[in-house]
Image (cartoon, rainbow, N blue to C red):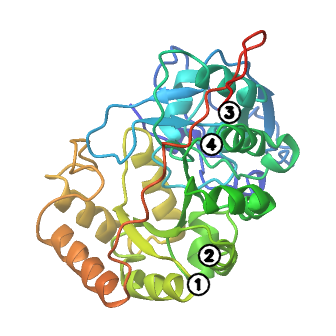
Amino acid sequence: MFRTSAHQIDKDSRPGRGAASNAPGRYERRERQAEHDGWEIAEDMPKIRTEVTEEMPRSVITHVGSPDLPFDRTLNPYRGCEHGCIYCFARPTHAYLGMSAGLDFETRLVARPDAPAVLEQELARRIYRVAPLAIGTNTDPYQPIERDYRIMRGCLEVLEAHRHPVMITTKGTGILRDLDILRRMAKLGLVKVGISITTLDADIARRLEPRVPRPEKRIEIMRSLSRAGVPVRVMVSPVVPGLTEAEIESILTAARDAGAVSASWIMLRLPQEVSPLFQDWLREHYPARAERVMARLREMHGGRDYDGEWFRRMRGSGPYAQMIGQRFRLAAKRLGLDRPQPELRCDLFRVPVKPGEQLSLF
């Protein structure tokens, strides 16, 4: 169902992109693919550009019930992500929009400019009960278009005004533009940040994550946040067996030296359309390693490319997964990163005042 080879896009048309194809979403009834017109005339295909449309959401807080996650609510300022990480487990969500998990996910983006206002309305509801809000769990809130839309900053302004705790996950240097807000929130115990690093090898990173800031830039993000008093966690994510697994210890060391106070890891996940996209990527960039990488993954998932069961989906099972976990635990303990980040405060939350309501005297 998810074969992508028939939908391959010429390399010259997709510079700086992660996916090599654009197969239809899994809910589409019709399939489209390019065909030669029969004329023996050389033509240059246009380069694929990023397109952004806007969405007016009625709700922006998504409640989740996954027992293996440390949060129960999320917010995503954008749908799709221009970073183009080929391994992104969120790619299949683009099918709900009638688009492809391939190039559409990283080139046809959806911005939600009203998200800050809608967020404030949701925080003001009588039934709302405060708990840390996770941002960046699906798509990166600091992808390049945030520079123009500033939706994430607007959400942070709302959260700061009402002293609501937030957990942020990102790879983007754009988070440093919001350092003023984050510094103030950190002083109140209202924010913590996770920075994801897959590899320190610049060449591998450029291929895996074509529009993500270089690894050394992400190390500098940690350093800047740490100096500002913001608790930082390094996320060794994802670990790609046979490609990046050797870097676990070096990533943790670099992060510790940059001020990270804790660490976590996630094994490569290939749900639904992500598996064929990633396998096409392997054959294009690392053909000699492709079979080894996939063999290791299947070994951890009972012979399948992916096992979506709770508590197994992010780590896998079996001897190889146990070995990776043990290496991580030993390195994290040695470096002092085997501790959780500080708990965020929920007792400072101030319910937004609706128009016409009387302000509290206290």
- Tell which tag, 4 or 2, sits nearer the viewer: 4
Q: Nearer the viewer, residue 129 or 322?
A: 129
Q: Amino acid at mark 3?
A: Glu
Q: Which residue is mark 3?
A: 35
The CA distance from mark 1 to mark 4 is 28 Å
Tell me if mark 4 has few (under 14), some (14-19) or many (20+) residues whose alpha carbon lies within 10 angstroms of its own: many
- Tell which tag, 1 or 3, sits nearer the viewer: 1
Q: Earlier in the sequence, mark 2 or mark 1?
A: 2
Q: Amino acid at mark 1?
A: Ala
Q: Which residue is mark 4?
A: 163
Left or right: 154, with 281 as reference point:
right
* Image coordinates for residue 165, horizontal then vertical, percent: 55, 46
- Tell which tag, 2 or 1, sits nearer the viewer: 2
Residue 197 shows in the view? no
Left or right: 353, with 190 as reference point:
right
Contact (Cβ within 8 Å) of mark 4 with mark 2: no
Q: Earlier in the sequence, mark 4 or mark 2?
A: 4
Q: Earlier in the sequence, mark 1 or mark 3?
A: 3
The CA distance from mark 3 to mark 2 is 53 Å
Kind of element beneath mark 3: loop
